[in-house]
Amino acid sequence: MTMSMYAASIPVFQHMLRNLAFILEKGEANAQARGFDPAALTTYRLAPDMLPFTRQVLIACDAAKLCAARISGVEAPKFEDNEATFADLRARVQKTLAYLETVPASAIDGSEDRQITIPVGREKTRTMSAQAYLTTWALPNFFFHITMTYAILRHNGVDLGKADYLAGAAGR
Amino acid sequence: MTMSMYAASIPVFQHMLRNLAFILEKGEANAQARGFDPAALTTYRLAPDMLPFTRQVLIACDAAKLCAARISGVEAPKFEDNEATFADLRARVQKTLAYLETVPASAIDGSEDRQITIPVGREKTRTMSAQAYLTTWALPNFFFHITMTYAILRHNGVDLGKADYLAGAAGR
């Protein structure tokens, strides 16, 4: 495989979403083992004006989905954003993975210079090349929210290590 | 510009390290404005068994430096890892950026299938293609530590927003 827009996007999203699903499993198992309500984790915020755990997971999923849709033109399913439990969140990851499976490399490769317009805040937009969008916007945003998900669990004593983040089940 | 190993690595590291430098400036300014010892931030850990802030910054810098060195073959400077203050950390980011400037695209492009061996833990190694290493190891690790740096500051009340992470000074 040679580096391409596809190789730099879809397989990366897939790999990390599978690791995210593994991290979610460990979070839920930890709540069960310690005997507390899993909602204590799923509603947790690292700061009062930060988004809660559930939103970190949903935004990670949507960062992958929306990037794939924007650079490929393959329409993405809309989801209701009503996930509350770990099971809901894992299902959201799986739905996102199922969509990514439908995006062919041929729809993405060669898209480097395609102009992509994205919303920034509530009223502004930004337009940039698909390559700049992928490398300096979509991927950093995607990794940010997966790491924040990990950080919330780790801050609350869930026994995670970076191998879980980097390699998921394969890291054990 | 078309997607390539260089485009997927060095400019991404440079962009995010500049944003990291901006985030560090905001952290220090916040400590000054609120009148507390900046070491309260630079030594902070999100969990007792996580690495402190200083190490998150150093590892982010080294994730970029070591990846660049491994896939390009351009020797990287060794640093002493004795940074303690915000000024030290910003200098480390600048030294890392200075090294990245010396790595030519020609040394990286076409490296997709080069075999890269990396240490994993204290005794094991892993070998994978440069492309797999970049996309599923080095970049995820790099973003992890930049996000963890951000998370520590944000958890401690520093007024950061995701625009600072995604766009640094240009996001204001």
Image (cartoon, coloured by chain):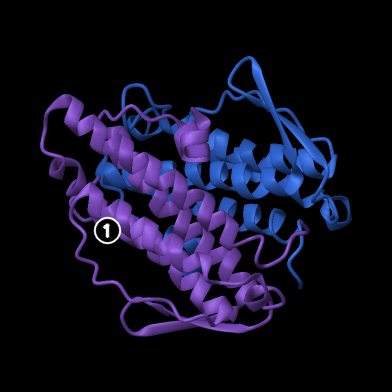
Chain colours: A blue, B purple
In percent of width and height, residue B48 lies at 18, 51
Please tell me which residue lies in front, B50 or B163: B163
Please tell me which residue lies in front, B91 or B119: B91
Q: Quadrant of the N terminus of chain A?
A: bottom right
Residue at 41% of width from left, 50% of height from top?
Answer: B146
In percent of width and height, residue A106 lies at 88, 56
Please tell me which residue lies in front, B48 or B45: B45
- Residue farthest top in this picture: A123
Q: Quadrant of the C terminus of chain A?
A: bottom left
Rendered view: B80 above or below B163: below
Residue at 24% of width from left, 38% of height from top?
Answer: B28
Q: Which residue is mark 1?
A: B55
Residue at 52% of width from left, 48% of height from top?
Answer: A143
In percent of width and height, residue B55 lies at 27, 58
Please give left or right for residue A39 compared with residue B67 in the image. Answer: left
What amino acid type is highlighted by mark number 1?
Answer: Arg
Residue B162: in sight, yes or no? yes
Rendered view: B169 above or below A123: below
Please tell me which residue lies in front, A71 or A18: A71
The answer to which quarter of the image holds residue B32 is top left
In percent of width and height, residue A15 lies at 60, 58
Residue A86: in sight, yes or no? no
The answer to which quarter of the image holds residue B120 is bottom left
Which chain does tag 1 point to?
Answer: B
Residue at 48% of width from left, 62% of height from top?
Answer: A166
Which type of secondary structure does the marked residue at label 1 adopt?
helix
Rendered view: B19 above or below B130: above
- Local packing at callout 1 (Cα closer than 10 Å; few below 14, some 14-19, many 20+) is many
